[in-house]
Amino acid sequence: MAETRYTSEHEWIRFDGGIATVGISNYAQSQLGDVVYVELPEVGRKVTAGDNMAVVESVKAASEVYAPIAGEVAEVNGALADAPETINDDAEGAGWFVRLKGVDAGALASLMDEAAYRKYVETLA
Amino acid sequence: MSTEDPRGPRRPAGAPLPGAGAGASADAGPGGTVSGNRALAIEERLLFEQGEAGRCGVDLPEPANFKPRIGGTERKGAIGLPGLSEPEVVRHFTRLSQKNYAIDAGLFPLGSCTMKHNPRLNEKMARLPGFADLHPLQPESTVQGALGLMAALVDWLKALTGMPAIALPPAAGAQGELCGMMTIRAAHDAGGQDARRRVLVPESAHGTNPATAALCGYHIDPIPANARGRVDVAAMKAKLGPDVAALMLTNPNTCGLFEPDIVEIARAIHDAGAYFYCDGANFNAIVGKVRPADLGIDVMHMNLHKTFSTPHGGGGPGSGPVALAASLAPYAPLPWLVAGPAGLHLQEEATGAASGAIGRLKAFHGQMGMFVRAYTYMLSHGSDGLRQVAEDAVLAANYLLASLKDTLTPAFPGPCMHECLFDDEGLRKYDVSTLDFAKALIDEGFHPMTVYFPLVVHGAMLVEPTETEPRAELDRFIAAVKGLKARLDAGGADRLKTAPHFSPRRRLDETRAARQPVLRWSPPSR
Amino acid sequence: MRYLPLTPDDRRAMLAAIGAGSVDDLFVDVPASARLARPVDLPKHAGEMEVERALRALAARNVPAGEAASFLGAGAYRHFIPAAVDHLIQRGEFLTSYTPYQPEISQGTLQYLFEFQTQVALISGMEIANASLYDGASGAAEAALMARRVTRRAGVIASGGLHPHWRDTVATHLNWSDAALTAAPADPEGKEDLAAMLRDDTACVIVQNPDVFGRVRDLSPLARACQSRGALLIVCVAEVASLGLIAPPGDMGADIFVGEGQGLGPGLNFGGPYLGLFATRERFVRQMPGRIAGETVDADGKRGWVLTLSTREQHIRREKATSNICTNSGLCALAFTIHMALLGEEGFRRLARINHANACRMADRLAAIKGVAVLNDAFFNEVTVRLPVAAAPLVDRLAGQKVFAGVPASRLYPGEAGMENLLISCATETTREDEIEALGRALEGALR
């Protein structure tokens, strides 16, 4: 299983077979509460690191999801439209948002690994 | 104004609530009723579930034979509207009304909303045919009294604000903001200052402020509050520059506090070549005591449905006249009310003195029905009464603050203005949220205060009693808050967490409403 | 003062509880230089009787439309409002409640908003509706902004049949963005070809039906043209009663419906408050402005209503909100909902037929006047006529005879060429046969 990396904005990214899968962390979903809606980018869109790529909404909040690294949107998780609760149930698995292609895997090195992210989250409490 | 902080404790409303065991619902089980009704609280189906074809609540004569001349655009098929007789309609809406809390029923301390008593004389006057039955495009010679009332309202608002011009058209506070910010943009553009695209907005501002500035093509630059709940003047000054168009500031601010450095703030804004927009939502605290012009404000909207007691009507209509400094008056929206040789006249075109006008914000000339109510209210109070309004509103809020300061945790020390602000620090040790506390107040017979606003205070509770509450009603509220706190001390937190228990509905599942939106009734077959 | 319950004793006791010496101690944060030492220079308080006298004196200087033979329309329509409507909206539980932020004690408001949304969707033939906007004109502006968000295009085309107040309201709202508004010239003859104006960057076409001159059109061909170019069709209906007779915007292929509900809700009121109706397709709901009531269940599983999809709105999304609107036209929406409930299917359709029948009679009477030409071949309750003389001075003169003959087009298009002789006249169910005759005779007399 590929290693998961995290951003300080609570996105996770996993690089596997030339494709990077991106979602929001389990911590992020717990802070957001019941997810009721996600707005996903169109396939083919090119993003650079830090771009606003998607929006995730609870009843009382809307949060932007940023691209952790540059790439092109290869696939979006269409199943979230009918089942946004998947993000609450399995944020770092079935609740993925976007798959990016054409990414520079080396760029992942600058992101936090799981241990560093866990430590970072502890500082937020 | 109520937003719930996503960072606060959450509980999906549809999930089983702790403590919501058997007997929690009055109409379930042997202790309940067979119909589901609870005495005066009668379950009422939708209009669409009770109407029948062939019934009608009006008697209209079928027109004699005629040949339609609508170019073959006839509607085909049934619309699907239910048919009901007048008694059924009256009963339906009467039953619905009984599921609402209202200022007529009791204290409604919704901070920043100014829920004060709505005098019935205002309603009666607004319904005089000489106002209510006027068509907006009647010949002006037939509406001189209506135009005269608008002119008189302008005179009163000028005297109360100290500002030289008033724009009446805006339909509500948010449109008043839009009007004000558009005049600022127009003035900058006309002065060759169109590079000014940044607007400073405190983090504590109403959401309408940034939303409005964005509609005018501005970028929003948030400015922080200091530890005393006021604008951090040094931080604000550091953000000033040649690209700043304006500061949008609510005063008294959304923490219920007057900005003591407001004159210095205004000076700094002006020195930077920018304008000072004041959100006048909280004008009730200072009406007759302070004139905004004397504080250095360039433009301010007022909510007639707050300060001047036109009824909120379950969410509107409002009216948001805008007071303008001389530098912004040339850009006021159309139409302009002007005195002409034949009497008062509505100038509808951007020519002559009005050539700089930003244009129209809506059809016709403003919320006349609200002007009549507000003017009636002003005449009733007079200049002395309006000053007393501000004093009593501020007195009542400070009385609540002083009476509750050891029960709830004040966000900032007093004195406050017309509303007092608490945070949820005093509740956390009981694992009770601001929302739980608000819902428990519902059971005690009160509309809750504004909760989770302003955003700068954790679990905010913003309490605005207004000047129209008798002291006994304030004391009843104080006793209820203290009683709930005593219940928490006695280990009764679960009772609050499952509140309300006695309202027409218990906590509603907002997650379900948003995940599977059902936004209209549809026939079962659809 | 009758609205202020605190007595001097109350005030003293409350100040003592606060620990303040005087009420001015509570205003310490106000700069001393800005504190007013005495009330501003305005009249002092007055009793109910005195205030009523003052207001009645102002009202008496106006001529209510109901006291004249009134043929005024052009965006504001005088309909008969059943007595139950005003009685019910004055119930304090509706009149003096706030926006339903606490749904457990606001189910009355929320349920009628849900019913209102359903009525608006049904009569417009659209899928979903919101809980009201300020008025039709600002609704048209919101629709244009929404179309830009949906299509991510800049171009907005306004028909020459769109009420000029609505057109100008759209222009004011678009003026501060990179939107490009193309307003077709005023079109009293109904000759414009909007489909030919479509471009690749057209976000929407805004058209009114019946248009400001009273003309009714089948908009289906325009809807198809818009669809083929990826633009949205916004259909505005200023006279909501027309929807009882004429095919609704949804049936003609509209993407957004904007209506003015004033005629069946709050009434004339000299121009406000009015009632903006707004409906669209379900798939655009996340881009829709304004509040929306939605169905859900409470903790006991009982059906109830809440404000929903609030993340679109300013109090959550702030500068990224779909609109800055907060207060809307709640009580006007209630008046509309009650009136529509009383009318029902049968009443709503019959009301429309009566309006049209009276307008046919009015059009025939006007056409019978020498030198007067009716421009519309198809209309609902309003027509435009060309007079042999300027309309505005004529209308002013006839007002002295208690005949409001119509709205001079020059009042709506000040300074615009070709409008001087055009008069827009409207008949509703309130129009009597003898009033139509009075109009005819007055015009004949004036034109003789």
Image (cartoon, rainbow, N blue to C red):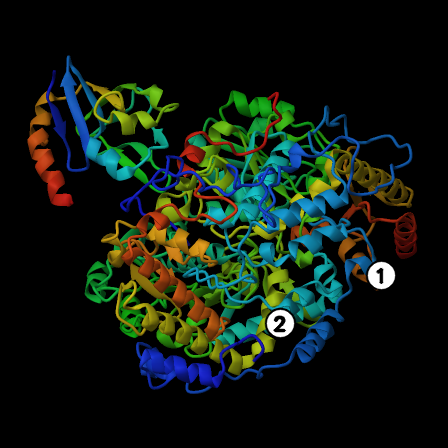
Q: Which residue is depicted at the point 75% across and 40% down?
A: C343
Above-or-below relation of A29 to B327: above
Above-or-below relation of B337 to A108: below
**Residue C346 visible from this viewpoint:** yes
Q: Position of residue B521 (x, y in %)?
A: 58, 32
Above-or-below relation of B101 to B383: above
Is C96 or C153 nearer to us in this picture?
Answer: C96
Disc 1 is placed on an element classified as loop
Q: Position of residue C258 (x, y in %)?
A: 59, 39
Q: In which quadrant of the rendered image does the C terminus of chain C lie?
A: bottom right
Label 2 belongs to which residue?
B376
Is B247 or A55 nearer to us in this picture?
Answer: A55
**Residue C184 visible from this viewpoint:** no
Same chain? Circles 1 and 2: no
Q: Amino acid at mark 2?
A: Thr
Q: Is residue A15 left or right of residue B39?
A: left
Mark 2, other Cα within 10 Å: few <14 / some 14–19 / many ≥20: many
Q: Which residue is depicted at the point 76% across and 37% down?
A: C380
Q: Amino acid at mark 1?
A: Lys
Label 1 belongs to which residue?
C402
